[in-house]
Amino acid sequence: MSSSHGVPQFDAPQLIALMNVFILNTGRCGSTSIIEACRHIDNYSAGHETRSGQLGAERMAFPDNHIEADNRLSWLLGRLDREYGDNALYVHLTRSPEKVSQSHIYRFSHGIMRAYSRGILRGLDENADAFAVGMDYCDTVTTNIKLFLRDKTHKMDFQLEEADRDFRRFWEFVGAEGDLEAALETLRTPHNSTRKNKRYRKYSGNWWLQRMGRLPQDR
């Protein structure tokens, strides 16, 4: 294995054996846009949270030649390691924790933040600041991913703030074939952005009461 511009390079026989790609992330960091861009790759399928509702062995039964982004895998890293170990390509997708947390404070009423604030953090003070909870979530997930990747050979970092640069590196890293320029154009188009409407209410202090509908929505 050699390296070019910080991206591991594999000879053809080795790369052929490593055709599952996992994009690990906190959520709210561009994973949907990246998967949409990956649909311009001819030699991989690509999906976002495609098996998140499956149980048992089916949860990890991803097809060969497939790129998967699923932030919930950060809670299933032991099973991911058991199934794929060092025989996959791993991408750690990151975004500024402050921006991730700012996005999450509009989503406390459902999804991963509801699960984290009500399930993982049992007995959380109802006056806890929503932004601080989001930062705590980001730190937890990021630390889990870094520990998982510590002994992995085939890995790369992808910063959303440098998406054009890092997608080119990603293209090389996975040995992608297809229309790179079309992929980059798709990547530059936001997907799954947080819409500040009735569904996405901003939570701050007293987020618990706001979520229960006992405080007026922020204006």
Image: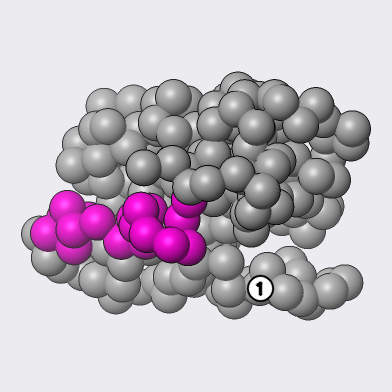
Residue 34 appears anywhere in the view? no
- Give me the residue at 44% from left, 24% from top: 98
State the image quarter where residue 205 is shown.
top right
Q: Residues within 10 Å of mark 1 (few under 14, many from 20)?
A: some
Q: Is residue 201 above or below residue 32?
A: above
Colour setting: one colour
State the image quarter where residue 215 is shown.
top right
Is 197 left or right of 67, judged from the image as shown? left
Residue 36 appears anywhere in the view? yes
| Horizontal and vertical percent position of residue 15 | 47, 55
Quarter of the image with the C terminus in it:
top left
Q: Which residue is mark 1?
A: 51
Q: Is residue 28 above or below residue 138?
A: below
Between 76 and 15, the residue placed more toward the observer is 76
Look at the numbered disc 1 and give the secondary structure of its residue.
loop
- Give me the residue at 39% from left, 31% from top: 99
As shown in the figure, which amino acid type bears the numbered disc 1?
A: Arg
Find the magenta span and give its range. 183-201
Q: Would residue 73 be counted in the magenta stretch?
A: no
| Horizontal and vertical percent position of residue 26 | 56, 41
Q: Is residue 154 above or below residue 112?
A: above
- Give me the residue at 70% from left, 41% from top: 208
Q: Would residue 187 be counted in the magenta stretch?
A: yes
Is 109 left or right of 161, judged from the image as shown? right
Is 193 left or right of 61, judged from the image as shown? left
